[in-house]
Amino acid sequence: MLAIGILGGGLAVVTLRNVIHSAVAMMICFGSLAGMYALLGAPIIAAAQVLIYLGAISVLILFAIMLTQAGDASLPAPFHRQAPIAVVIALVVVGLVAWAAVTTAWRVAPTAAAVAIDTIGKLLFTDYALPFEIIGFLLLAAIIGAIFLARRPEEDERAN
């Protein structure tokens, strides 16, 4: 079911004409991917997927759509002349990935790597605290820049 959510959401993102519907389909894809990570035994990656992609990135994209007033735009597909070439290239890429998956000698790891969640938390807030804060400020600057770019000059004149 999660694989259907990932593939269906991904296809809907690139095929839907309404931008808001595409953003919601992207959120479904991200949520299904987080569920897949959880089932594969990677709860840290699943939590990061939910927090970063499903939470922050999806909300940021929806805010950008709403601030630029592009939410009601149902645009025609701009790449309709390039569709046959895109289908051929996509089939070649899928064929190459399938060939690589079939011809690779897959081995099972002798032991699974175990990382404790408390160790990751301690490292995040001690050794990696500065990069963590820098990324936070970078995201804040991106949001402020998006709001500044989305403003209309008429709103500034009415405020004065």
Image (cartoon, rainbow, N blue to C red):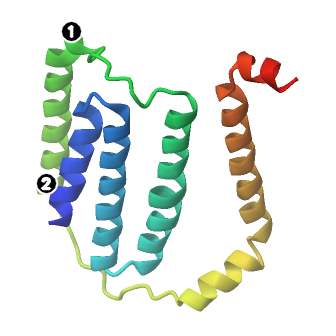
**Residue 88: x percent and y percent?**
14, 23
Left or right: 103 with respect to 65?
Answer: left
- Farthest residue to the top: give it: 81
Q: Amino acid at mark 2?
A: Thr
**Mark sitting on residue 157:** none
Q: Against 88, is 35 above or below?
A: below
- In three-dimensional space, the C-alpha distance between marks 1 and 2, rounded to whole angstroms, equals 35 Å
Point 25% across, 33% down: residue? 16
Whichever of callouts 1 and 2 sits on the residue coming sooner in the sequence is: 1
Q: Which residue is mark 1?
A: 81
- In this orientation, which residue lies closer to the viewer: 13 or 158? 158
Question: Judging from the image, what secondary structure is the residue with disc 2 in?
Answer: helix
Quadrant for residue 68, please give it: top right
Q: Is residue 34 visible?
A: yes
Please provide percent x and percent y for residue 27: 36, 53
Residue drawn 27% across the image and 78% down it: 39
Q: Amino acid at mark 1?
A: Arg
Q: Which residue is rendered at x = 72% and y = 17% of the image?
A: 154
Instruction: Say which quarter of the image contains residue 11.
Output: top left
**Residue 113: x %, y % from top left:** 43, 85
Looking at the image, residue 123 lies above or below residue 151: below
Q: Quadrant of the C terminus?
A: top right
Residue drawn at x 11%, y 55% is 102
Secondary structure state at the residue bearing disc 1: helix
Numbered mark located on residue 103 in the image: 2
Q: Position of residue 71 (x, y in %)?
A: 43, 31
Give 68 or 111, whichever is nearer the viewer: 68
User: Badge 1 local density, few (<14 within 10 Å), some, or many (20+)?
Assistant: few
